[in-house]
Amino acid sequence: MRSPFRPDRPPNAAVLDDHKPLIRSLERRGLIRGGLSLGALVMLTGCDVRRPEAVEFALLAISRFNDGVQALLFDPNKLAPTYPASMILRPPKFNAYYDVMDVKPVNGATWRLEVSGLVTDKRAWTLSDLQALPQTSMVIKHICVEGWSYIGGWTGVPLRLFLERVGADLQAKYVAFKTADDYPSSIDMASALHPQTLLALKYGADTLADPFGYPMRLRTAVKLGYKNPKWITAIEVTNKYPGGYWEALGFPWFAGI
Amino acid sequence: MASPRLLFICGMLALAGAAHAQSKTPGGIPPPPGMSLAESAAMRFPQPVRVGDLIGREVLRPVESQDVLGRVRRVVRDANGQIMVVVDFGGFLGFDSRPIAVPVDAMVLVGQDMEIVAFTPKQLRQFPTFSPVGTADVADDAIIKVGLAKPSH
């Protein structure tokens, strides 16, 4: 039977060829690629499918809308699953946007954590300052956007407690991070205040090892792995969208789980 | 025309979170030419791991397809005192594999798996079948250090 949706005049098939590189870039999710047929591309219009940037713009707009829906659905009181300490993977799994040989260890003795933006106390923190704050432990699953996961045990300062100590404006929209490996990142305030969001100083009972973010990294149970910057050197509370390393390359910003 | 368009957008909403692989530089590259296994392992930030936790792990090839080369059967110290990982290598679905001894410095930890980074499958096929004569098992509770790599996909 002829589809009732079939247009009287079929679109030019060359359109699909024009977007080959973009479609190929979705290679790890065959379902999306399968879905991006000529018809689907044309239906994405409103935008002009002859211009690749128009298609990318439309996809990014969907991703931003998605972020908004996730933020609406986020329940600040709902806890992510936790696991017994016996399930902690030791050592944890290493990942970065480069291989381990390019890790540049940070000297904990001279390390300082800068604090800026909408906070009353902009004093820089040392590692021993952070160690002197109340610590919390959690055994949670690290879930990577690539599809792998592992269970890890983390100890550190709840980010909520830290933000309260520095007199942060808890009504602000974003908490942004800068790191020693040039991996900027940021999360929404609701996730920053979640009880399973830590400034982690330890893995298991041991001080964080160099490849995993010594002296301090973010670990949150409510975001995908790439929202957990390591080797953090600065925290900013802001209302201006800070973005992040992968977000600038098209990854979703909210990335909640 | 509104409804298929809406359907498509709903589909994209569900999928827009999926994303391209994160790799910028590949993980688990072989040792640079002329570098010893020990030197190259030292560059991979060796981390303490309990020997008993290695037994049974899958051993992968450090390429995007992450082909399974075998499984860790045991960890031994050879006659020279070098720590070797005995891998049930090759075969198909666990049949017809044979044990080979791979220097621990030729391997890395990738989360719950291990990879052999210093030898190709072709080279591994030339490895002699492992014989326990002259070797000593390393106790399950012993802690050894093994280098790391990022995932190869």
Image (spheres, rainbow, N blue to C red):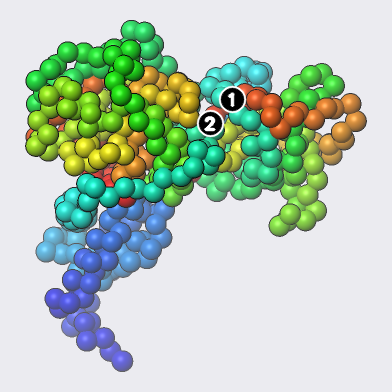
Up-down relation of residue A4 to residue A42 (above or below): below
Which residue in the protein does label 1 denote?
B48
User: Would you say A17 lies left or right of B132 here?
Assistant: left
Q: Is the C-beta separation of discs 2 and 1 under 8 Å?
A: yes
Residue A111 showing in the rendered view: yes
For the question of whether residue A230 can be seen, the reply is no
Both labels 2 and 1 in a single chain: no
What chain does badge 2 belong to?
Answer: A
Quadrant housing residue B23: top left
- What type is the residue that disc 2 sits on? Pro
Q: Secondary structure at mark 2?
A: loop
Residue at left offset 19%, top offset 50%:
A71
Residue that numbered label 2 is attached to:
A91
Residue A83 lies, in percent from the top left, at 46, 44
- Asked where in the image residue A14 lies, by quadrant, the reply is bottom left
In the drawing, does residue B44 fall left or right of residue A4?
A: right
Residue B6 spot, x, y in % from top left: 18, 71
The x, y position of residue A220, in whole percent, is 32, 38
The kind of residue tagged 1 is Pro
> Gap in Å between the C-alphas at discs 2 and 1?
7 Å
> Front-most of A43 and A15?
A43
Q: Residue A49, percent across and down?
A: 19, 61
Taking the spot 74% from the left edge, 48% from the top edge, the residue there is: B90
Q: Check the residue under mark 1 and report the chain it is in.
A: B
In the rendered image, which quarter contains the N terminus of chain A? bottom left
Looking at the picture, tell me which residue is in the foreground, B107 or A137. Answer: A137
Q: State whether residue A251 is above or below residue B14.
A: above
